[in-house]
Image (cartoon, helix red, strand yellow):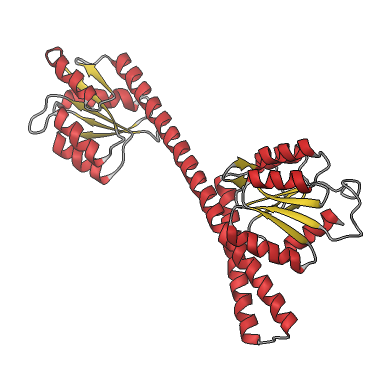
Amino acid sequence: MADVRILVVDDDYASRLLISKILEKEKYEIVQASNGFDATNQLRKSSFDLLISDLKMEGMDGIELLQKARLIEPTLAVIILTGHASMQTAIDSVRLGAIDYLLKPINSDELRIRVKKAIERVQLEKRLTEIERQMTFSATVTTANHEINQPLTVILSGIDMIKMEFEKAGVSDEKIIKYLTLIEKSSTRIANILRNLREISSPVIHKIPHGMRMVDLQSQGRDKRFREKYILLVEDEEQIRILVQDMLESAGYRVILSANAEEGIEIYKGQKDLIDLILLDYYLPDGSGLDVLRKIKEIDSSTKVLLTSGFELHDDIEKAIEEGAIGFISKPFNREQIINMIHQITT
């Protein structure tokens, strides 16, 4: 275990040397210090996995060294060495944060066992800390993805709509188009960076594609080719509702809006024979997309439901698709992406 570093502190040379020799045979890297002041300097210069310190030393005793070591490295494991006469002080040192204590004279077998257990505990705590750090990072990335993807969807959709309105009005200002294109490229770049962060923080073997999961669309649903297509949009973000409605209506669809799960289900109950597709945000203030999907499928199992979200919902989307969702499109999306997908579903 050459990668484990131990600082041995004792003002008695013979005791310090004995401990060091025993532990070096176990392949630990040992650094010696003859007093508490030398030990604190060593701790400031480099990192250690374990500190073994005598309790009774001249100038700075083991308790004071323990307190200073905790200030320098709060997670450092400490074992205190003591004689029989100082048992209560040794117990007090454990209360102050020492991981263990050993009685002098040192028994070599006991020393090896106690040090091994201390190192195992240190390594376990490091692994748990790293897992916690990764989970915190993953949760932060997930939240940031959602919070950023929502406005990115508005930006990208808004750019598409501006370009379309310019084209309809015959406006051909090259500078404005150039600036819009730059904004679009930068927004797409941000979306790609976020997607890469998601994959780093939460790698997935089977990734949900940005699009359709089912190919046999023609056989599903009622034949409504000879009238306008109605889409129920269930989305709690007002800006996204407005822009997605404009995008869909610009492509000839009729859009019914709902801001939450309860309202969306009630609208569908009353208009189910009219609605061709439900575009459903997975996270709503009053229910999950899976719950809404199940309630809709109870009303009519042939209903087409397309899910969308700013979160990366691998397992949840897999489950929803198993239960009848027609597909998934992640935010941010632009006009072309959403129109193409809906066209495939509703044609």
Residue 76 appears in the rendering:
yes
Nearest the camera: 36 or 136? Answer: 136
Vertical arrangement, residue 298 with respect to residue 142, above or below: above
Compared to residue 271, the image places residue 112 above or below, namely: above
User: 265 or 212: nearer the eye?
Assistant: 265
Q: Position of residue 69 (x, y in %)?
A: 22, 36
Name the side, left or right, on which 68 lies relative to 232: left
Q: Residue at x 77, y 61 (%)?
A: 254
Q: Which residue is drawn at the image coordinates 67% and 37% (left, top)?
A: 291
Number of marks drawn: 0
| Residue 193 appears in the rendering | no
**Residue 168: quarter of image:** bottom right
Residue 76 x %, y %: 30, 34
Query: As drawn, which residue projects farthest toward the front?
Result: 270
Residue at the image point whose x is 69% and y is 86% from the top = 171
Q: Position of residue 176 (x, y in %)?
A: 62, 83
Q: Quadrant of residue 5?
A: top left
In the rendered structure, the answer to whether residue 8 lies left or right of residue 305 reads left
Identify which residue, 252 or 160, lies in the foreground.
252
Residue extending farthest to the top is 84
Q: Nearer the viewer, residue 317 or 288?
A: 288
Quadrant location of the N terminus in the rendered image: top left
Q: Residue 113 vs residue 343: left or right?
A: left
Tell me if 117 is positioned left or right of 78 in this view: right
Up/down of 16 relative to 212, above or below = above
Q: Position of residue 132 (x, y in %)?
A: 45, 37
Quarter of the C terminus within the rendering: bottom right
